Amino acid sequence: MDLNQKGSSFLSEVVQASGETLQACYQCQKCSAGCPVAFAMDILPNQVLRHIQYGHREKVLSSKTIWICASCYSCSVRCPNNIDIAKIMDTLRTLALHSEFKPGEKDIPIFHSAFLDTIKSKGRIHELSLILQFKSKTRDFFKDAALGLKMYRKGKIKLLPSKFSGGKEIKEIFNAFEKGART
C-alpha cells in the first residue's frame, strides 16, 4: 500500500466515523485561534485536520491534543465550512482508545474511559464511583486523598449515587453505539 492509499484510508475512516467532511478544511486557522486550550496542545486543531488529510494516523492518535480538547465547540462554531471539529476530536479519542498507539496523555484516556464506564453503569455520573475506578486504574491512590476528604466533608461527593430513572435508556444508547462500532 502506498502512502496515498494509507492516507486516504485514515481520512476515510475519520470521515465515516464522524460524518464530517473534513476535506473541506482550507486551513484558515479560525479553529485554532479561538481554542481556549490551544496553549496546552502539541498540535493545533487545524493541524490535526491537515495531518488526517495526509494520513498521519499515529501522529494524530498519539497526540496530546485529542485528549486536551475541552469539547467546548468554539472551533466548530468558528469554522467557515461548518466542520464540526469537536465531533472529529471525539471521534479521534474513540479511535485512539482502540488503536495500538500510546496516548500522548497518560491519565486523560483512563479518566475518559472511567467516566464513560460510570455513566454506562449508573445512568449518570457518580463522582465517588468515578474517582474509585480512576484511582484503581492509575494506581495513584493517595495523590488527591486530602482534597477528596475535604470535598466529602463539604457535601460535594456523595457516598451513594442519586436516584435516576433513565438508567435503562442510557444503557440502551451505549449498547446501540457498541453494536454499531463492531459492525
Image (cartoon, rainbow, N blue to C red):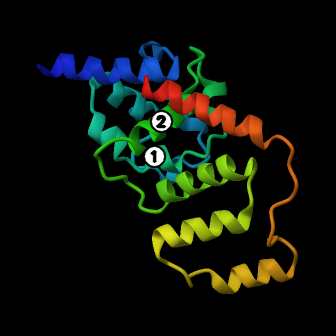
In which image quadrant can residue 175 be found?
top right
> In whole angstroms, how far apart are the C-alphas of marks 1 and 2?
8 Å
Q: Which residue occupies 47% across, 41% down?
A: 93
Which residue was labeled with disc 1?
A: 65
Residue at point 62%, 27% (across, down)? 76
The residue lying toward the viewer, choosing from 176 and 111, is 176
Q: Is residue 130 visible to the viewer in this orientation of the structure? A: yes
Residue 161, image quadrant: bottom right
x then y, percent, for residue 143: 56, 82
Query: Which is more N-terminal, label 2 or label 1?
Result: 2
Secondary structure under tag 1 reads: helix
Secondary structure at badge 2 equals: helix
Residue on which the image places disc 2: 45
Query: In which quadrant is the C terminus drawn?
Result: top left
**Compared to 32, does 125 lie above or below?**
below
Q: Residues within 10 Å of mark 2 (few under 14, many from 20)?
A: many
